[in-house]
Amino acid sequence: MTDTTEDRSMSIEVPVPVAVREAAEGAEATEATEPVGLADRQPLSLTEEEMSRAGRRAIDVIVERLQAGANGPVLVRGRREDLERVWREPLPEQGDDLVALLDRLARDRTGLGVGMHSDHPRCFSFVPCAGNFPAVLADALVAAFLSVPGAWLVGAGPTQIELTTLAWLRELLGLGPDTSGLFVSGGSVATLTALTAARDHRLDGVLAGARAYSTTQAHPSVARALHILGLNRDQLIALEPDAGLRMDPAVLADRVRRDRAAGLRPFLVVATAGTTSTGAIDPLADLAALCEQEGLWLHVDGAFGAAAAITARGRAVLAGLDLADSITLDPHKWLFQPYEIGCVLLRRPELLKESFGLARHFLDTGYLAVTESGGEPVSSSNPGPTPGLKAVPDAAEVNLSDYGPQQTRGLRALKLWLSLKTFGAAAFREAVERGMELADHAGALVEAQPELELTSSPQLGIFTFRFRPSGMERGATLDAFQSAVSNAVLDAGYAMVTTTQVRGETVLRMCTINPRTDSVQVEKTLDHVVQIGRSLAVLRAGTGPTG
């Protein structure tokens, strides 16, 4: 599945028997001269002028949206009853003007603009997605060309673009030469896909007694994936992390050995490369060594943090990433792609085909046999439907539908391909490095502000902190105060700063990876938090603890 072809701009000529070519040319000539009758007119089409007019308006709307991202509030709240009044309407029996519909959708207060503007320079909540203009165009091209990188026969060009993009991603992350996989909707499906291969490869279809291991800091998608795969919640052992909120290899080793001694079947360790709460990184190299010793599959959930490995600084703190059996990565997070594009990568990608290959799951082989990859070569006993033509593709023709749960799948890779070709890898490295530098800068500002307290040091562009009113001790009251500060920040609409839990306490959290932000916006947001914290502290002092 590894792509080693060179990047060339060239046409590809495929030899076609003369009789077949002449028959096709004759059919095309007949179609060109026959008049189109009323019954043959296409009901779901627009004229060239209508499409051009709507296309120009769509591009204008997109450019206006991207240029105006810094203007207005970062969060536009919408009440369900208000949006129901705007959008709940009868099924349209007759069509409407497309340009007018585009304008309706683009309205900030009632349409697509209602919600969080994650590309706003003061959006520091969750893992903000920035997107970029080439990626927007890529999604439009994919839709226009109906690109399906599933079966090679159906989408050879799209498949090759995805293989090339996977090879670039492998190179960017510093992974082994055989590492590959496929693009999926996001981290949840990437993790599900990887853990399916882990289950099939390590458990031989027997789930009884199986045990998987993570820490309590792991993403909920891990537990959900194991649930879908048929494991009970008690078969996932969520270990307490160390003081740095990382998995402790010694604690893991002890638990694995105790479980084995009890007759259980440890098979999987899920490490995290950048937890979403604090950016903590599990010790990947040490865990890889332990998994090798114990015969366990190591999956690294790097949905957010693995992208840091494209920089020298990130690769150093993610040492051991290349030793994982499988990796989850979301380009719609720290590779600045619009939703949705996730990725699953395996050191041995052929294991995906062992789990998902269509031939394994055929019920009726006749319908899709022509698309099966790696079929028998043409021979006297298998001449194909036409002498000289293959019955099925050869082994070099990759069917990406054999490597995951989707058979019909969109060309998500194109947005990343076009972004990398437009801006270059150096621009991506600079943007990722800048996100980490901004978190370091913000952490220093927090430590210099007496009313703020750093609760976890900056890691991979994430840090946590709290506003500490004078005289307020740690506990439920201080936790509730952080929630009140966050709610007030959101209500003001100036910035997005939300809360998380760190060691059982409620704290404020900021993620500074948005390439559209800068040190000035970070400083203004922290000043805004301090001003709101002071105001709430004054109100609380005036009304008493229960006011």
Image: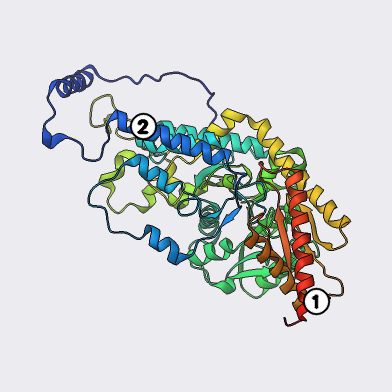
Q: Is residue 23 left or right of residue 501?
A: left
Q: Quick one: 452 or 77, which is closer to the camera?
A: 77
To which residue does mark 1 refer?
Answer: 541
Q: Please tell me the numbered disc located at residue 385.
A: none
Q: Amino acid at mark 1?
A: Ala
SS class of the residue under badge 1? helix
Counting from the top left corner in percent of width and height, residue 176 is at 64, 39
At x 76% / y 44%, what residue is drawn?
519
Numbered disc 2: secondary structure: helix
Quarter residue 28 falls in: top left
Q: Amino acid at mark 2?
A: Arg
- Asked if residue 376 can be seen in this view, the reply is no
Residue 390: x and y in percent read: 31, 30
Q: CA distance from mark 2 to mark 1?
A: 60 Å
Residue 143 picture location, percent across and down: 39, 38
- Callout in the foreground (2, 1): 1
Sequence-first disc among 2 and 1: 2
Q: Which mark is residue 53?
A: 2
